[in-house]
Image (tube, coloured by chain):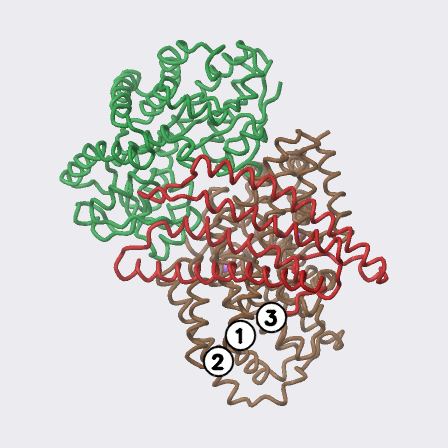
Amino acid sequence: RELRIAPGAPPAHPSNSHLYQKMVEYLPEESDGRLTAKVLGPEVVGLGQMKDALQTQIAEVGNLLPLYFPADLPMMAVTGQLSLIGTNSQAMGAAVTEFIVNCAPCQEEMKKLGFVFLGSGASDVYEFMTTKPVRTAEDLKGLRLRSGGAPWARLAEHFGAAPAQISVLDQFEAINSGTIDGTMASVADMLSFRLVEVVKYVTPAPLGLYHSTSNFTVAKPTWDSLSAEDRAAMVRAANRANADFTNRWGRDMPEEAEAAAREAGIEFIEADPSLIQAIEDFVQADIKTAGEFSREQFGISDAPEQIQQFLGLVEKWQAIAAEVDSDPEAMAERVYEEVWSKVDVSTYGG
Amino acid sequence: MRLLYRLQDGFLALLALIGALAIVALMIHVVTDVALRNTTNTPIPATYEIVTNYYMIALAFVPLAWVERRGGMVQVEVIEPLLNARALLWSDRLVALVSTIVYGALTWVTWLTALKNFETGVFVMAQNLAFPTWPAYFLVPLGFGLAALTTFIRMILPRRDTGHPEIAG
Amino acid sequence: MSVATGFAGIIALFLLLALRVPVALALIAVPVLGIAWLLGWAPAIGLLSSTPFSFVANWTLSAVPMFLLMGFLAFHTGLTGGLFDAAKAVLRRIPGALAISSIFACSGFAAVCGSSLATAAAMGRIAIPEMVKSGYSPSFATGSIAAGGTIGALIPPSILMIVYGVFAETSVIKVFVGGITIGLLTALAYSIVVLLTCWLRPDIAPPRPLDAEKIDRRRAILDIWPVLLLMLVVFGGLFSGVFTATEAGAVGALGAILISLAMRRLTWDIFKTSMIETLMTSSSLFIIGVGASMFTRFLGLTGLTGFISGAVSGAGLGYVELMLIVVVLYLLLGMFMEPFGAMLVTLPVLLPIFKAQGIDLVWFGVLCVKLLEIGMITPPVGLNVFVIRNVASEYATVVQIFKGVIPFLLADLVIVAVMISFPAIVLFLPSLMN
Ligand code: NA
Ligand code: NA
């Protein structure tokens, strides 16, 4: 059986090249050729259309970003509120995966949409990419920085910078002409959005990372039509691809982008220890804000408790990631052992 | 019948007014945002979301019935020169029928979407602000529904007085 | 099997268009029925329910109504009339001066506007009435501006080029710089078309403006300051980073209102008329956009686009054969698809081939955008032609505009041939940047 699968991103993006193309490769391997997959490009299903496309079976498996649909996936949006805490990509991908598989309200909201969750991934740690040097907290004052979401907006505001909402297509021109002074994002954007041509300085700092993904979101009718054997095969294929994806998105691509940035003469600035400390302090304090924010905005009464649960998993997976040096194959094995082997596929997602 | 037309035209003018207000609001909102960003470094929150989800949706969909009534929908007139008045009238009716079916289908499915989004209370995150977008989804079936009604009326009571939109308003 | 459905969809589209079904509705009906046939009703309904909102709720697109409003206001208040009078008065001895000035005005407008549609729309309202008044045939006048609008995406800023740069992982700025050359070359080629037409067919393009004698030269030249002021505000703000290219439309529209108010030229009637025209054009255009996007999604799902672009990857073609096939591929897809969709379905197939053959990706970026822009003026789905039909409905039908476009399309093919034969023309300026 051939499944229609939709990454919602162009071929060069890791969620296409190292997530969905890997699925095309792994699915027949894991299912002894019973299952194959055909990729639908972003011109057929874009990220904003993913929810509708899955619910109406235009696509049968899709890359769903929960932050696009916070009203439908409030519990998953809560983990998004904690984007600042991440320091290791593989650890965060694994922690989010284990959290969502075992969190009852998360499973409930996926079920309500008619979706089945098969794991998450994460980017590398974000950096300041600017046209004015950022070394100290003082340098951030008054800067206009593009922010990709609420946590980074809070961080920018805390340091007296103005968070700007600029569309990804406009950001190139906006930085080029000085409408904004830069962005807080993955250094991979140097290549993904060609910022290498307009940015002048990069300041690495503990700005968290992007981990709010549901990499392989399976539509319920498709999931229901699969035998337990086929479901297990899909879980194994997804689990392998998830680790490959995070390795590409969180490690290989940033390395390439950093090399390209250095070659382009972009200056890498070492932030003053006082700025690093101030950001770390803010991130710790922001955990409480994120809990209250989620309680008020998303109506989740036990958000602070859920967050504690999540933080415990983050700690656990950071230790594991350190142990295996974030090696994708080893990570995939550990996630399978710790999470998926404990899942009964005949009832999961039912 | 004349009363029906007058009622219809008056109502359609109201739709155009809503669309025009969306255009003016879009212009003033964006310019104010630009001005505030450059003077006080405090842009208007949720500008991006309001422009895309409200102004754009309102100006595109609400005036559809009015556009239909004024013959503003683009057609390719390949066979038009070959048709006599009678054939043209029947062709108009056929086109009105197809239009009514397409608009009707659009109305139905976008209405279901709007209801679903209303039940969920759909919102988007504008940085730190949860900004509701579900009301905007109702503008789409409103626009399509009234357009369906207009083409339906044109199918049963055809009139060829406005083949092309006369610009003078 | 599904590829056949794609072909059937194209035939059905032709049929519906010939039966006078509005373009937008034909573009919506065919993919829905096609997907229902292919995958069942649920996916068809999904396409129908999600595309309208997701297509229109788009930030970049918001520049279109704003630039339209600016153009309509400038036309009705006569802000730009001074410019054309001046052009007619000063250039009265040059054949076709008015059409040529309009084409270069498109190029100037292109420098503040990221999209070809907005360029065609705004310039169409301003220039076409002036051209018809001076004796150009409506078909030629509308065709020249529909084509002139395509310069909007060739001269930076250009959203299409940014998307290409991101996709091909190549320098956006170099593609921009290459685009300047080809944008200006296009304007030059179009001007030659005008000159030739004046010479061969004085009945459709008068060598001299019929109303030039009546113009007071000194007054006309003094009368261009309001439009210069407007340009100064928009250019100045854009290049100094006060606002982005998308926001420039709103600034331009408000600027036109304020300048015409200050000159006491803006009456309530003019304001109302401009609003009505803006609304009519944006609304009908966005519905066509919704349809074009649905049709693109449909062709993607059928695998037809993959099938056609896959034909290119066939065994070891030489440079010339490869380029010929690429050109034909884009001309075919450009007939039916909107440019972003056509780019997204072709690049994944083409880029690896080009990389293997060592073809310069900056060069191809410019060529690709040029080819996609040709699709904006080819039948049956020519978005620039549709927008012109709306802003100049009292002058020409869609068929007449498509006819008027033909000589400019021929010029485009010559430019494409030149770009393929002499890549250095595109790459000269970008190569100076290293
Ligand atoms: Na441009
Ligand atoms: Na076309």
Residue C62 visible, this angle: yes
The hue of chain A in the figure is: green
- Kindly identify the residue that appears in the image at 68 percent across and 73 percent down: C195
Q: Is mark 1 within 8 Å of ligand 1?
A: no
The residue labelled by disc 2 is C265
The hue of chain C in the figure is: brown
Q: CA distance from mark 2 to mark 3?
A: 18 Å
Q: Residue C113, which numbered label?
A: none
Expressed as whole percent of the image width and height from the top left, the position of residue C189 reads 63, 65
Q: CA distance from mark 3 to mark 1?
A: 10 Å
- Callout count: 3
Packing grade of label 3 (10 A; few <14, some 14-19, many >=20) is few
Expressed as whole percent of the image width and height from the top left, the position of residue A233 reads 51, 13
Q: In the structure shown, which secondary structural element does the residue marked by tag 3 occupy?
A: loop
Query: For this rendering, which residue is in front, B162 or A235?
Result: B162
The residue labelled by disc 3 is B169
Mark found first going from the N terminus, 1 or 2: 2
The hue of chain B in the figure is: red
The residue labelled by disc 1 is C270
Expressed as whole percent of the image width and height from the top left, the position of residue B54 reads 46, 51
Query: For this rendering, which residue is in front, C432 or C90?
Result: C90
Task: Check whether the beta carbons of the residues at disc 3 and disc 1 lie within 8 A of each other.
Answer: no
Left or right: where does residue C413 sit relative to residue C368?
right
Task: Check whether the beta carbons of the residues at disc 1 and disc 2 lie within 8 A of each other.
Answer: yes
Q: Is mark 3 within 8 Å of ligand 1?
A: no
